Amino acid sequence: MEKNNHTKQLRSATTFLLLWLTFIGESQAIWLTIPTSGTKCVSEEIQSNVVVLADYYVVADEVDHHHQIHTVSLKVTSPYGNNLHQKENVTHGQFAFTSAESGTYLACFWLQNKHEQPLTVSLDWRTGISAKDWETVAKKEKIEGVELELRKLEAAVEAIRENLIYMKEREADMREVSEATNAKVAWFSIMSLGVCILVGALQLWHLKRYFRKKKLI
Amino acid sequence: MCSIIVLLGFLIGLMMMISKGLALSISLSDMECVSEHVFHDGDTVSGSFVVMDHDIFWNSDHPGIDFTVTGPGGSVVYSLKGTSGDKFEFNAAHNGIYKFCFINPISTPETVSFYIHIGHIPNEHDLAKDEHLDPINVKIAELREALESIVSEQKYLRARDARHRYTNESTRRRVVFYTVLEYVLFAATSILQVVYIRRLFSKSFAYNRV
C-alpha cells in the first residue's frame, strides 16, 4: 500500500518537475524524502573561502486531495555551530555563503506541521567552481558558445589541480598523525614495562620494611 | 573529504548541459534514498560512495552496507551488497527518476559520503534537433566527461582519505586512553596486593588464623 502511494507520488512529482523545466530549463538536484517526524540532514566537509550556493524547493504532489501547501523548515549550520540560514515553513528558497572556516557544514530539514506523508524536497547544492556564475562572466568578457565552453573546461581543470594540492596537504597531515601514533605506541609500551618494574620494586621495598618493623624477618 | 559538485545548467537553448554531479554525506540507519532525474536516454550514471564508520568498535564485525539503484520503471538497475565503499557506473537506458538507496543491515547509524554524476554526450539526434550545436560540441562534451571522470576519482579518493583520517584519529585516542588506563590499573593492583598482604600479617587477622 505504501509502495503504491510512493510510486504515485513519484510519478506526480515527475510531472511537476517536467512542467517546471519548460520554464526554467534543465536543472539537476537530488531529491530527499523528509520523514514525518525527525530531521533529515545532509553535510559536507568544505575548506575555508569556498563559495556555497544552494537552491531548494518542495516537490509538489498533484494527487493531493486536500490541496494543502506543503512546507518544510530547514537550518544550515557551520562547523562551529553558527547558524548560517534558518527558515521555517517555506516551499522554496535559496541561500549562499562563503565558508569562513574549514569543516563540516550541515543542512537539516524537518517538517514543522503535522503531515501524514513524508515530503520530497529537491536540494541543489553547489560549491566552489560549480557555484560560479557563468552568465555574468560571458556578458562581462563578451564570449559565447564554444569559447565559453572551453573556458568552463579550463576552470574545471584548475579545480582538479587545486583538489590535488589539497589532498597532498591532507596526506601530509595524516602522515604526521600516523608517525606520532607510531612513536607513542613504542614509547608507551616501554614506559609500561618501566612502570611494571617500578611498581614491583616499590612493593618489595614496602613489604620488606613492613616485615622488618613487625620483627618477622 | 567529500565535496559536493552540482552544476546547475540554466542555459536555455543549449542542449548540451553542463555535466551534473552531486556529493554529500547523509547519516544512515536502516535505509536512506536519494533520487536524481536523468533527462536523456542512454546517459551514463557514474559515482562512488564510502562509508565512514565512526563508532564501530571491532571493525571486522560490520558487514558493510548494501546499495541499490532503482530505475523509473521500478526495476533494480544496479546493486552492490556488503561493501564499505565502491565506485559504480552504468548506462541509464530510460530517462526518468532514478533512486539510489543505501541499506544499513545493523542498527548502528553510519555516515555515507556519496557522489553521483550524470553525463550526457549529445548524439546525432540532438545535433539534428538543435541548430546551435556543432560536431565540435560533441567533442567538447566528450572532453568534459573525461574531466568529470578525473573529478569523480578525486572525490572517491577524498572520501576514502576522510575515512582513513577517522581511523587514524581513533587509533591515536585509543592508544593514549588504554595505556593510561593500564598504568592506573597497575598501580591500583599493586596497592591492593600490598594492602592485602599487610592484612594477612596483622595481629587481629593472625590470631584467628595461626
Image (tube, coloured by chain):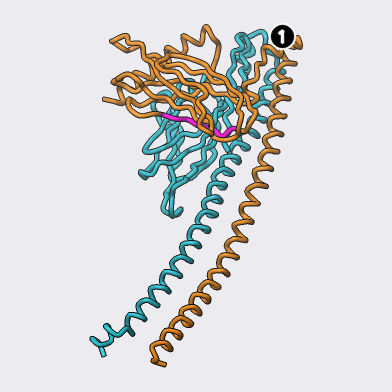
Instruction: Tell me the chief SS of the magenta region.
Output: strand
Quadrant that contains the C terminus of chain A: bottom left
Q: Which chain is cyan?
A: B
In-image side of A160 versus B160 (left or right): right
| Local SS, label 1 | helix
- Which residue is at a point 37% across and 21% down the rendered structure image? A119
Q: Is residue A43 magenta?
A: yes
Where is A88 relative to A186, above or below?
A: above
Where is B59 relative to A213, above or below?
A: above
Residue B159, percent from left and from top: 56, 40
Residue range corresponding to the magenta coloring = A40-46
Where is A81 relative to B190, above or below?
A: above
Q: Which chain is orange?
A: A
Is residue B89 among the parts visible in the rendering? no
Residue A87, percent from left and from top: 45, 18
In-image side of A144 versus A37 (left or right): right
